[in-house]
Image (spheres, helix red, strand yellow):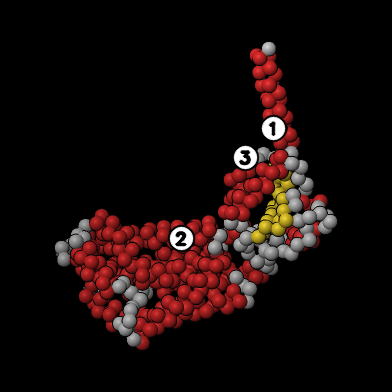
């Protein structure tokens, strides 16, 4: 009798599980996503939905781009009216009775929770919703519900800003000084070709380390969903960095300098003077990049904050490639100039010291204007 009861229980459980699975397979979940081309938050939501879609075969995602399509903008407004809510920006997701504006890791979990809920209960098609039904609004960081013209303005601001900040980083006297010490050390062996290859290897490692650091920080800002807040912080940071560089032009050496700290310099020189080979120059570049951070990170962090707020990941990747190429360009020029005999390391160091204050002046003006411009753009709603 017990065996029969167990068999009946197992059959009933199997039937129940099969019924639930069958019911879930029959449930079509409608998710409406409104996004804007070039919106960084939208790009992250796209990636998130692509990752989870295979797990939910009955999930039907309806995507509408609203920056360049007037009909989609009108549909967005119509659905917002039906849900009796205001448009907060993009991306915006409509699922059952929920409106989810913006995107972050936490909002991604909210979206997936709603999908899972809709597998268990009957969820309606959001496009059929009427004003009389209750709406739940969930908000996070989003990009403005802006016109295509404003998007173009934002993109036109970003590229010159990247070029300007990269130029500021490129003329930074810190990187010049380090490269000159390295070339002087290797030239002492009397082999110019080795000095050329060492200079190129050192420059390549600086490029790789800075590119990877930038990519990592950009990804962290995006993942944390703090793009807007971080943008505001780095705009203010740019103003301070600019003012501090102007201080170095007017009162160089007073209080502090926007260069490698004085206490670090003896250890830095000791590290470089032990390098006599090309592989050694390549490896030491990764270590030296950490020493250079106090005097080169200001413009870089400012640009990373700007990119996180105004571009997609693919666009940011290309701009980081460009930024870091401009950053290492003077190092390449010095390396080739010394190798081909256009100058010597002594003359290059003499020029660097002579122009030190002027370089701080140029950097200060550019980065100060960049910070002010970023705040103005945010104030006017361009960002």
Q: Position of residue 65 (x, y in %)?
A: 69, 58
Mark 2, secondary structure of its residue: helix
Q: How far is mark 1 from mark 2, CA to CA? A: 42 Å
Q: Is residue 128 visible?
A: yes
Residue depicted at 53% across the width and 58% down the height: 224
- Which of the two discs, 1 and 2, labels the residue nearer the N terminus? 1
Residue depicted at 68% across the width and 47% down the height: 114
Q: How far is mark 3 from mark 1, CA to CA? A: 14 Å
Mark 3, secondary structure of its residue: helix
Compared across the picture, whether 364 is left or right of 199 comes to right
Q: Position of residue 66 (x, y in %)?
A: 70, 61
Q: Which quadrant: the N terminus?
A: top right
Relative to 118, does residue 164 appear above or below in the rendering? Answer: below
Q: Residues within 10 Å of mark 3 (few under 14, many from 20)?
A: few
Disc 3 and disc 2 in contact, CB within 8 angstroms: no
Q: Position of residue 249 (x, y in %)?
A: 36, 84
Compared across the picture, whether 26 is left or right of 247 comes to right
Q: Which residue is mark 2?
A: 217
Tell which tag, 1 or 2, sits nearer the viewer: 1
Q: How far is mark 3 from mark 2, CA to CA? A: 30 Å
Where, by quadrant of the figure, is residue 295 drawn?
A: bottom left
Question: In the image shown, does 217 or 326 lie closer to the viewer?
Answer: 217
Residue depicted at 54% across the width and 63% down the height: 226
Q: Position of residue 318 (x, y in %)?
A: 49, 60
Q: Residues within 10 Å of mark 1 (few under 14, many from 20)?
A: few
Q: Which residue is mark 3?
A: 55
- Which of the two discs, 3 and 2, labels the residue nearer the N terminus? 3
Q: Is residue 361 visible?
A: no
Q: Which residue is mark 1?
A: 21
């Amino acid at each position: 009798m017990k065996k029969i009861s167990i068999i009946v229980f197992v059959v009933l459980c199997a039937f129940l599980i099969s019924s639930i699975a069958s019911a879930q397979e029959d449930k079509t979940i409608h998710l409406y996503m409104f996004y804007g081309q070039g919106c960084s938050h939208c790009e992250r939501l796209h990636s998130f939905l692509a990752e989870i879609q295979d797990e939910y075969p009955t999930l039907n995602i309806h995507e509408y781009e609203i920056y360049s399509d007037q009909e989609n903008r009108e549909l967005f407004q119509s659905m917002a009216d039906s849900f009796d809510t205001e448009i907060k920006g993009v991306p915006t997701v409509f699922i059952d009775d929920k409106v989810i504006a913006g995107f972050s890791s936490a909002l991604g979990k909210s979206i997936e929770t709603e999908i899972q809920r809709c597998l268990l209960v009957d969820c309606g098609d959001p496009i059929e919703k009427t004003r009389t039904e209750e709406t739940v609004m969930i908000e996070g960081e989003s990009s403005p519900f802006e016109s295509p013209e404003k998007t173009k303005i934002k993109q036109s601001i970003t590229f010159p800003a990247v070029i300007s900040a990269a130029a500021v980083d490129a003329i930074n006297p810190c990187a010049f000084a380090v490269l000159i010490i390295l070339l002087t050390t290797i030239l002492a062996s009397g082999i110019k070709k080795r000095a050329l290859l060492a200079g190129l290897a050192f420059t390549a490692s600086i490029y790789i380390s800075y590119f990877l650091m930038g990519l990592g920080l950009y990804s962290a800002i995006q993942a944390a969903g703090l793009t807007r807040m971080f943008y505001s912080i780095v705009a203010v940071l740019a103003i301070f960095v600019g003012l501090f560089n102007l201080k170095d032009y007017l009162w160089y050496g007073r209080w502090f300098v926007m260069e490698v700290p004085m206490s670090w310099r003896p250890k830095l020189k000791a590290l470089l003077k032990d390098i006599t080979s090309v592989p050694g120059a390549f490896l030491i570049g990764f270590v030296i990049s950490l020493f250079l951070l106090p005097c080169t990170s200001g413009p870089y962090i400012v640009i990373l904050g700007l990119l996180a707020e105004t571009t997609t990941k693919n666009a940011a990747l290309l701009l980081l490639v460009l930024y870091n190429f401009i950053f290492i360009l003077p190092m390449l020029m010095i390396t080739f100039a010394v190798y081909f005999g256009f100058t010597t390391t002594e003359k290059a160091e003499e020029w660097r010291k002579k122009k030190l204050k002027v370089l701080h002046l140029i950097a200060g003006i550019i980065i100060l204007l960049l910070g002010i411009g970023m705040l103005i753009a945010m104030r006017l709603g361009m960002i």
